[in-house]
Image: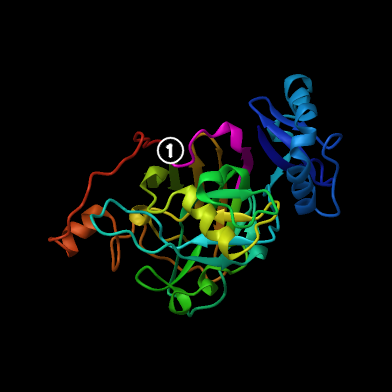
Amino acid sequence: MKLVLFTQNNGPAHAGILTEAGVIDASAVAPDGHDPQATMANLIARYDEIRPALLALEASAPALPLASVRLLAPLPRPGKIVNCIANYWENAQREARPLNMFIKNADAVIGPNDTVVLPEFTEPYAFMHEAELALVFKGPSKMVRREGWRSAIFGYTCLIDVTARESGRRTWRNNSWMGKSFDTFAPIGPCIVTADEIEDPNDLWVQFWNDDQLRHNYSTDDMEHTVPEIVEFITTIMTMNDGDVVACGTNHEGLGFIQDGETLRIKIHGIGEFSVGVRDPLGRSWERGVYMGEGSTNHEAVRRNRPDAVLREASVPGVETQA
């Protein structure tokens, strides 16, 4: 099931079910909370109880056309957004790096068709996109062993980890979370796909376009530390509650700059896709295309800058070059 938050005619936010026909209003089964985040968190908490009623709605209730509603971020203000650092092999032959994470500002969330606003602040030299699979937790989940990881996961969504850079692809402020946490730097959407719809989260195809240019194009089977390991690690450190999010990292081979007037689109096959715009009050510009500079893991850049590096062939389910 694909669960969303939506508004219609500037009305209140409701829970809904996203279908091919549009959005089914589920507020009669999953009532509005005191704010949109509470609406979705309450749905997650009560999902096992209300699932039969949601399935009945999905099977028979009329859908509102997508053009008549506004989709919001399905988790507008998570209690926690935790991001894996790197966490992809990027087809290099080396030992796995230790799993590590940082916390991203939960107030940075925006949703489909919203706008990433680059800060009027010139210390970061540039801004980049990172397309990521995000795990949506049900809780309280604490000390979950990797063998029982499914007990902690409610579903999956798409997240764009917008990042301010200090130099090359180094995150601003000495690789700290500050460069990840400017307002609007966490687009999430378009829906939460419940866990039963995804057989293996480490077998998903992630794509990302800047305008119509394909940049990220990778499979989640390239993760250094898989979803079960991520669940065990994070719940060993902290309790994960209903609607908390962990982004699984990205394959940096497709990194690139973002700038004023561009449209960013993420698609994870089996989950969904959505777009956001970019606005820069300072009107700055950077080179378009896949980043090939300092620290790039793109194969062409690696062969150019580190000719002795040993690379593996990329594992991508297919190649889609058209928007």
Q: Which residues are magenta?
A: 189-203
Residue at 54%, 51% (x, y): give it.
Answer: 145
Tell me: residue 89, above or below residue 150: below
Q: Which residue is mark 1?
A: 203
Q: Percent from the top left, x then y, of residue 295?
A: 30, 66
Residue ID at (55%, 37%): 271
Of all residues shown, which one is farthest toward the left?
308
Left or right? Give the position of 321 relative to 181. Answer: left
Which image quadrant for residue 96?
A: bottom left
Asked whether residue 29 is in view, the answer is yes
Quarter the C terminus occupies: top left
125 is higher (above) or lower (below) than 70: below
The quarter of the picture where the N terminus appears is: top right
| Residue type (three-letter) at the residue carrying disc 1 | Asp
Does 196 lie within the magenta span? yes
- Relative image position of residue 308 (x, y in whole percent): 12, 61
At mark 1, the secondary structure is loop
How many badges with numbers are in the image?
Answer: 1
Question: In the depicted view, which residue is nearer to us: 254 or 196?
Answer: 196
Is 310 placed above or below 196 here?
Answer: below
Residue 260 appears in the figure: no
- x and y percent of residue 12 in the render? 84, 47
Magenta stretch contains residue 72? no
| Vertical relation: 232 (above or below) 61 | below
- Tell me what residue is drawn at x 27 percent, y 51 percent: 91
